[in-house]
């Protein structure tokens, strides 16, 4: 997984032209394997060095986000997002490309997203709360944006361990 500071993470990713077996066996499988190995709630293709508009997200019970409601595993290609409200919600957010850190990030509470799954079938979903947050976070990666840029109050950023020791973030089993 590429880490913050790597200029590749700042690039605008290219649209996927063809959804086929090569894509499924290649990039998509690599993303699924990486996300599983890292206990991530989501991953975007640019994070593994691929400049394509593909994101994957899903949460059953994730030790990184113990309070998050379940989100079905979704492979979303060429995503489009519509914000359905001006209301935002702030939550401590992390990223596999920004290991050991967390920041308090406001995100839109309710969105609609669309795109295609790995079989080329259309996806159209209304999401709220953590589900909306993870989609917004992953799609930001496709536009070269990392969560620290979304933090409103720069003082609300720090190392996970310190934030946990201070009781600002509850301690969990796994840390990345
Ligand atoms: Ni991320």
Image (cartoon, rainbow, N blue to C red):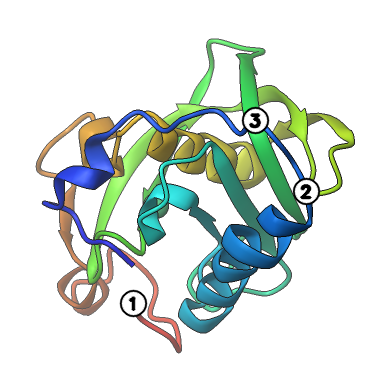
Label 3 element class? loop
Q: Earlier in the sequence, mark 1 or mark 2?
A: 2
Q: Residue at x 55, y 28 (%)?
A: 15
Mark 3, other Cα within 10 Å: few <14 / some 14–19 / many ≥20: few
Q: What residue sits right under mark 1 in the picture?
A: 176
Depth check: give the residue in front, 164 or 47. 47
Q: Residue at x 46, y 30 (%)?
A: 14
Q: Earlier in the sequence, mark 1 or mark 3?
A: 3
Label 1 element class? loop
Label 2 element class? loop
Q: What residue sits right under mark 3 in the picture?
A: 17
Point out the image quarter for the N terminus: bottom left
Q: Indicate left or right for 156 with 11 as reference.
A: left
Is any atom of residue 69 visible in this view? no
x, y percent for residue 82: 64, 14
Mark 1 and mark 2: Cα distance apart in space: 32 Å
Q: Indicate left or right for 130 with 9 as reference.
A: right
Q: What residue sits right under mark 2 in the picture?
A: 20
Question: Residue 73 falls in which quadrant of the image?
Answer: bottom right
Q: Indicate left or right for 81 with 150 as reference.
A: right
Is any atom of residue 53 visible in this view? yes
Mark 2 and mark 3: Cα distance apart in space: 10 Å
Which circle marks residue 151 in the picture? none
Q: Closer to the camera: disc 1 or disc 3?
A: 3
Q: Residue at x 66, y 23 (%)?
A: 111
x, y percent for residue 89: 48, 32
Mark 1 and mark 3: Cα distance apart in space: 33 Å
Q: Closer to the camera: disc 1 or disc 2?
A: 2
Relative to 3, residue 9 above or below: above
């Amino acid at each position: 997984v590429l880490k913050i500071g790597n200029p590749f993470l700042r690039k605008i990713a290219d649209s996927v032209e063809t959804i086929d077996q090569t894509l499924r066996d290649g990039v998509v499988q690599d993303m699924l394997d990486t996300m599983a190995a890292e206990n991530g709630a989501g991953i975007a293709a640019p994070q593994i060095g691929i400049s394509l508009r593909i994101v994957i997200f899903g949460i059953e019970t994730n030790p990184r986000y113990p309070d998050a409601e379940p989100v079905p595993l979704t492979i979303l290609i060429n995503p489009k997002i519509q914000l359905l409200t001006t209301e935002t919600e702030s939550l401590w957010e992390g990223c596999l490309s920004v290991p050991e850190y967390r920041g308090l990030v406001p995100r839109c509470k309710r969105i609609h997203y669309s795109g295609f799954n790995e079989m080329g079938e259309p996806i159209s979903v209304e999401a709220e709360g953590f589900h909306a947050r993870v989609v917004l976070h992953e799609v930001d990666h496709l536009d070269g944006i990392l969560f620290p840029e979304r933090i409103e109050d720069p003082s609300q950023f720090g190392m996970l361990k310190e934030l946990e020791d201070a009781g600002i973030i509850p301690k969990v089993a796994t840390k990345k």
